[in-house]
Image (cartoon, rainbow, N blue to C red):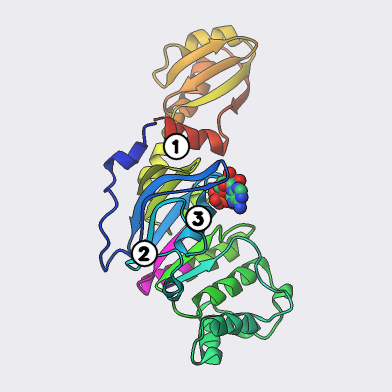
Amino acid sequence: MSVGLLEAAAPAAPASSATAVELRNVSRWYGNVVAVNDISFSLGAGITGLLGPNGAGKSTILHMIAGFLAPSAGEVRVAGMTAWKNPEVYRHVGLVPEREAVYPFLTAYEFARMNARLHGLPDADAAAERAVDTVDLRGAMHRRIGGYSKGMRQRAKIAGALVHDPRILLLDEPFNGMDPAQRMQMMSLLKRLADEGRTILISSHILEELDQLANNVLVVVAGRLAASGHFREIRRLMTDRPHTYTLSSSDDRRLAAALMAEPSVQGLELGEVLTVRAGDRGSFALALPRVARAAGVTLYELRPTDESLESVFSYLVKR
Ligand SMILES: Nc1ncnc2c1ncn2[C@@H]1O[C@H](COP(=O)(O)OP(=O)(O)OP(=O)(O)O)[C@@H](O)[C@H]1O
């Protein structure tokens, strides 16, 4: 398998004070399911996106970094220490899990204070108040979490993960189910937390969610690191790939003949429907109506055939 941008990416750097998180040839299997397959990367301060379709292994990676799950092979290091079986690591890491792992009968303040106590902080009340303030929930901190909106519940979870002021924050699909306003609020919170010098890793299955947030993106597909690089570079890889469409028109044969001369068309197949492979989506979209009009053909339908998320990821892996 070729690995896209990975070839140009720097190999995992040796642990240093700047390396908050480091994975060295890490694999994790559950019985005979290989969830994570020989992954290496390192993270410093700032926001990194962990992108991949469902089941790619994102949660498994986050749980191993948090020290909650043992790697089956390789090593996960956090703040220069082995993450597994090392309670010291919990001081440095806050994990915001994907599941709604909050008791609905607790208030945000009680939830944060419970976490502060579990960390054994000397002043759990002050730590809880500080965390609730950080996520802008002061006004609602004595209301039960069960009555919160989705965005507020996520922020309550973040308050719980931030209560011991960790240097590393891991968030599993934090934008799931949020409306645009909640998303904007979450983005500005995460940026603020990163500006304070934290290392933040955010998992997502939607690239656009990471726009304006993560400079660097790690793409995981079927447990492997398929690509890594700057957000714009990853987006270019995903959108510039060839696209396949099916077309229906008043005269498919005539349209196929006219499209053959079009530079943005890489391939054509005329069966029950006309299938076109376009190298550059933008140029093809501009060319198609012009070509159809010149050929005297009426277009009825243009349908992309390979737009599933899995097809985009598998394109990255096969490059
Ligand atoms: N406790 C477990 N026992 C068995 N298999 C598991 C377990 N946890 C995860 N897996 C499997 O490992 C693979 C990776 O799962 P993981 O949850 O890490 O992926 P993910 O990218 O976070 O996806 P999702 O967003 O759907 O949770 C999947 O095939 C999943 O079914």
Q: Do the CB atoms of the residues marked 3 and 1 lie less than 8 Å apart?
A: no
Helix, strand, or loop for circle 2? strand
Spot occupied by residue 132 in the image (x, y as percentages of width and height): 56, 82
The answer to whether mark 2 is within 8 Å of ligand 1 is no
Residue 203 numbered mark, or none: 3
Residue 290 numbered mark, or none: none
- Camera-side residue of 70 and 252: 70
Residue 239 numbered mark, or none: 1
Callout 1 environment at 10 Å: few (<14), some (14 to 19), or many (20+)? Answer: few
- Looking at the image, which residue is at 27% across and 48% down? 11
Side (left or right) of 146 relative to 49: right
Mark-to-mark CA distance, 3 and 1: 20 Å
Mark-to-mark CA distance, 1 and 2: 25 Å
Q: Is residue 303 above or below residue 99?
A: above
Spot occupied by residue 307 in the image (x, y as percentages of width and height): 56, 33
Mark 2, residue position: 46
What segment carries the magenta color?
190-201
The numbered mark, 3 or 1, whose residue comes first in the sequence reads 3
